[in-house]
Amino acid sequence: MTKYRTRLLFALITLIIIVLVGLGLVLGQLFKNYYIHSFNERIKIEMSLLTANIEQNGGLDKLDINEIDRMGDLLNARITLVDMGGDIRYDTGKISSINTSRHNEIIGDVVEDKPKEQSDLEIGGGYDLHYYWKPLIHKDKKEGYVFLTTQINELQKAYRQIWWILTISLGLALIVIILLGTRITNRYTKPIESATNVAIELAKGNYRARTYEDHIDETGMLSASINILARNLQELMKAKESQQDRLTTLIENMGSGLILIDSRGYINLINRPYREIFSVDPSEYLYKLYYEVIEHEEISQMVEEIFMTEQKVRKQVVLPLEIERRHFEVYGVPIIGTNNVWKGILLVFHDITELKKLEQMRKDFVANVSHELKTPITSIKGFSETLLDGAMHDKGTLEAFLDIILKESDRLQVLIQELLDLSKIEQHGFKLTIGKVDLLQGITDVLGILRGKAEEKDITLEIGQISGNMVIEGDPDRIKQVLINLVSNAITYSPNHGTITISLFDKKEMVSIVVKDSGIGIEKSEIPRIFERFYRVDKARSRNSGGTGLGLAIVKHIVEAHKGNIEVTSEVGKGTTFTVRLYKRFPG
């Protein structure tokens, strides 16, 4: 693209050339007219002197040829005297370039036609002559004509000189004007070009562009204004980018799925949680009609309802996602701008699956606690009433019933104690008493405590592989409680003559405690639930053994409080293996 400065300079030079050429033509014509007028006036004066001399000397009849030749030489002109019949009385013939026949022809035409004008130019046939004639009057009688013929070489020479002078003068003027015009245009167009370039950069989004401010005139004010505009745009863009970043961060990390639908029903935005929850590809979702891509009929109906009523909608829905059903609380809000302009719909999906699970767990917990407390209390009450009704007088019956009442009381005490322990562990302010724990010694103590229970079923308790240093940082009492619960569970669910093995493995920064039994095993579908409160794999066996269903829940919470983890592998009919991993140095 041609620069603005070049185009402006070209336009100015073109205008100046046109003006100068026009001025030259006008001045040349004026000079020419002035010179011709002066020439004609001179010819008139010379003709008047010539005719006056001839008339004073007696007219055509008394011509003084010498005088006429002298005057022809003096005037540098050809003098021709003609009578009224057109005959030439005398001709000085001083201009050799004049063709005689043509000369006579012109004189004859003048005498015959008697024109009113007394001047003529002969420019045809290569001639450049000026004819001037005047009647010759003697004694108030026209005797003939006097013709004065001159070459106008001097006129042409003067005319050429005028054009040379005008051409040189106007050429120099043009050069000076071009130089001055170039400097002037540079001075006044450079700031404009710079401002234009900055404006182009601003339009491209480069808000760091600036122009040079070097004048205090209008162009300087323009540059300053452009720079102020650029700075303001840069600040606005920074604020916009910052706000956009905050908004994007908020939308992408809000934890709830979000979908934005415009007024025509096209999806304009889905955030990262929505993509992760529903496993959707943005390229298949964005800028498409909502009812073409949303698979769940409840959501499509909800959008239609908002479009029709223009009211907020809040619903709880259960949506199948892959192999599970998840609960969502969906908020639908119509977006209405200024002047009640319909903008679209915003849908927010809150995943309340965990809340529903917790609510169900709470219900199950209440039901289980009620059931677990009701059973021993019912037994104690029933046997007590039976004794009071007279059975206490039978010593054998009394001892049997009291023994049952004692066992049920112990079971009730264990249940309450474990509920208290679980409640304490789950409290927010629960703290461990960190100290040195010798795992090997702890396992030896636990096996000593539970050996009597194992001998009742002829179960062998043994310590398996031991590797490395088995002293870690932790709460000795809580870790001992973990070992007791795991080994006790293994005894409960192992058949007679079984084997329970406890091994310790050094894993660099961690220690693995492995409790392996040869019990009944656990179905794969039940493994995720064994750490729930009151959940039993074999309800009859665990209840008959005095189990409460809280042991593994307590184990899980204690291990997690130590920043460790617990894993379970099991095969039905072959046994179960619990693996507890704890850090050697407690991560505070």
Image (cartoon, rainbow, N blue to C red):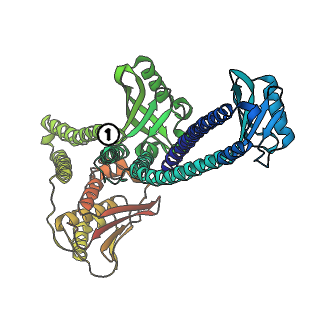
What residue would you read off at disc 1?
A: 355
Q: Specify the farthest residue to the top.
A: 309
Give the x, y percent position of residue 481.
22, 62
Nearest the camera: 177 or 286?
Answer: 177
Nearest the camera: 448 or 22?
Answer: 22
Give the x, y percent position of residue 233.
33, 45
Give the x, y percent position of residue 56.
65, 32
Q: Is residue 458 left or right of residue 268?
A: left
Identify the residue shown where x is 82% and y is 42%.
125
Report crowding for label 1: few under 14, some 14 to 19, many 20 or more residues within 10 A (C-alpha). Answer: few
Quarter of the image where the C terminus is located: bottom left
Nearest the camera: 445 or 383?
Answer: 445
Does dot 1 land on a helix, a strand or a loop? helix
Q: Is residue 339 left or right of residue 91?
A: left
Q: Quadrant of residue 47?
A: top right
Identify the residue shown where x is 76% and y is 47%.
95
Identify the residue shown where x is 40% and y is 32%.
347
Q: Quadrant of residue 331?
A: top left
Give the x, y percent position of residue 185.
43, 50
Above or below for 9 versus 440: above
Can residue 27 be seen in the rendering of this structure?
Answer: yes
Q: Amino acid at mark 1?
A: Leu
Above or below for 175 versus 71: below
